[in-house]
Image (tube, grey):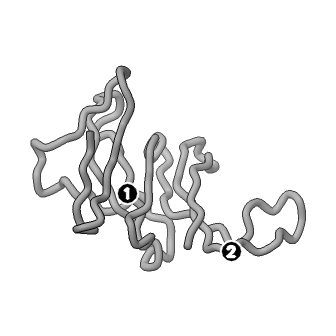
Amino acid sequence: KYLAWMARTNGGALNLFCASLPLRPPSNINSGIPGGRQLTACQSRDICFYFTFTRDDSRILYLRETEHGSELYHLYAIDIEQTQAPLSGGGIDLLAAHPKVTCCVGFVGGLQLWLPRSDPNIAIIS
């Protein structure tokens, strides 16, 4: 349903973008991805290093550091169809109600995020 990607914006930080599929042909070679729109507008640091779609393709989930350099992450969600203008603070912090719950992502091993078919509102992070 959508193509999503990260790209650097004018401030130099990585932000999330998306476009509906199928893509339209570009009007010229330098026009970027046709129909692409910016979802986040963070300027101070990269929005995330990992993102995925929910099973119904209506939202993008991503991990973002709670503080720069802390390696403690919160899970955020962006509703693709409801987001009309880039969000300066990013999406909805799904762990904000639980300030002591974080996801620690270190330099050893990879990140795994599962979205069980039985419940689209659950995400399991390992």
Q: 107 left or right of 30?
A: left
Asked if residue 82 is positioned above or below residue 61 in the image, the reply reads below
CA distance for labels 2 and 1: 22 Å
Q: Secondary structure at mark 2?
A: loop
Residue drawn 47% across and 51% down?
42
Residue identified by numbered label 2: 22
Q: Answer left or right for 32 relative to 78.
A: right
- In the image, residue 31 sits, relative to residue 58, either above or below, namely above
Instruction: State the quadrant of the N terminus.
Output: bottom right
- Residue 106 is situated, as x and y percent measured from the top left of the image, at 32, 25
Q: Is residue 20 left or right of residue 74?
A: right
Image marks 2 and 1: residues in contact by CB distance under 8 Å: no
- 10 Å crowding of disc 2: few (<14), some (14-19), many (20+): few
Does residue 73 appear left or right of residue 51 in this picture? left
| SS at circle 1 | strand
- Residue of label 1: 61
Can you say whether 66 is above or below 3 in the image? above
Camera-nearest residue between 68 and 28: 28
Question: Which residue does the image show at 71% across and 72% down from the upper left?
Answer: 23
**Quick check: 125 above or below 95?**
above
**Which dot, 2 or 1, sits closer to the camera?**
2
Question: What is the three-letter code of the residue carrying label 2?
Answer: Pro
Where residue 107 sits, quadrant-wise, is: top left
Q: Which mark is residue 74?
A: none
Query: Which residue sits furthest top?
Result: 108
Looking at marks 2 and 1 on the same chain, the residue that comes earlier in the sequence is marked by 2
Q: Which quadrant holds residue 14?
A: top right
Residue 46 on image: x %, y %: 48, 42
